[in-house]
Image (tube, helix red, strand yellow):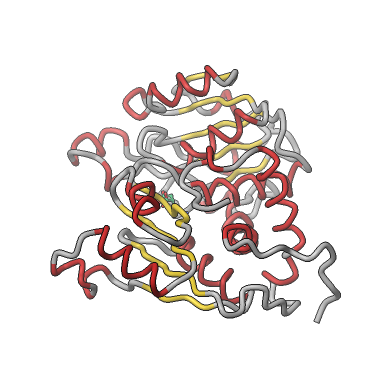
Amino acid sequence: MNSLITMNDLTNDDIHRILADAEKLLPVAKGNLHLPLLQGKILGNLFFEPSTRTRMSFETAMKRLGGDVVNLGAVASSSVVKGETLHDTIRMVDGYSDVIALRHPLQGAAQYASDCANVPIANAGDGAGHHPTQTMLDLFTIKQAHGKIENLNVVLVGDLRFGRTVHSLSYALVRFGCKLTLVSPESLRLPDEIINELKEQGGELEITEDLKPQLENADVVYMTRIQKERFPDEDEYVRVAGVYKLVADDLSSVKKDMIVMHPLPRVDEINPDVDSTRHAAYFEQAFNGVVTRMALLCDMLNIPIPEKIGGEK
Ligand code: NCD
């Protein structure tokens, strides 16, 4: 693999291989084993939008594997405020690094950056577009819980229109034969072009506004935040804010191994009383960002993962 812009850059075999590599790297991600596979390599972190998990887990992944990171830092203290274009920033940073993680408010920015850069670009979120590295950690989390990523009932909930995590994830899940139930207010439905493409790929989709009846049959319930920052006007946001709120009592008759996921940050979609149920998987999911991005970085930098990774420290 070179750049990772959308899930189309990975075949199903690539996905399975990277998930298997990530699993092998678990002791390294937990700090129990020192494995400097990326020594001498530098990641350029370019985050033009807020980020906690994605930026920090990319950085942790790089450092756990002995590599290093250079950061754009706050946009306000970079040359972007002097009017530097994305093109010029990328051309600069690709001289300072071996791989770039880019988050940008504009859909299409990651593809554009990859066209300008000499080093591979990992799309860490482009506006309301895609977020493929998140999808890889989501798939890893699903596989850890269910032992597979094939043929599951997955309920995607919330802002399916502006939420880039669910865009990338829905493409991947359909490729593995999962059935998707799309739960959102009418105004925040998955965009038509995505629905059409998923259907062309044979995707089995159900569209509804009603969350509660979907819980019983679900293997995965994937909650998302309403993406306030992408709304053209505040009134429109206020109309849909707080529309879905999952509480522990809602989970009384769900499947025993059903997992509740969320890319985080949450606002009020998941009540904290869900955290202590057996179903809550979102903090584990956030940790899985490290191990999955380790495997992705090795793949993008063409560094093979050893067949066997030795004992604990
Ligand atoms: C998501 C994002 O940035 O798209 N966050 C993340 O990467 N974990 C989800 C969100 O911001 O709602």
Residue at the farthest left position: 82
Which residue shows up at 67% across the image and 49% down it?
Answer: 140
With 25 as the anchor, is 194 left or right in this view?
A: left
Q: Position of residue 231 (x, y in %)?
A: 24, 40
- Residue 236 figure quarter: top left
Image height check: is 206 above or below 156?
above
With 204 as the anchor, is 95 left or right in this view?
A: left
Q: Where is residue 11 in the image (x, y as percent from the top left)?
A: 63, 39
Q: 179 or 20: nearer the eye?
A: 20
Image height check: is 201 above or below 162?
above
Which residue shows up at 27% across the image and 58% down it?
Answer: 87
Q: 70 or 88: nearer the eye?
A: 88
- Residue 38 figure quarter: bottom right
- Residue 213 figure quarter: top right
Which residue shows up at 67% across the image and 45% down it?
Answer: 14
Which residue shows up at 59% across the image and 42% down it?
Answer: 10
Q: Quadrant of the C terminus?
A: bottom right
Q: Where is residue 309 in the image (x, y as percent from the top left)?
A: 81, 69
Image height check: is 188 above or below 71?
above
Q: 221 or 255: nearer the eye?
A: 221
Q: Where is residue 284 in the image (x, y as percent from the top left)?
A: 63, 57
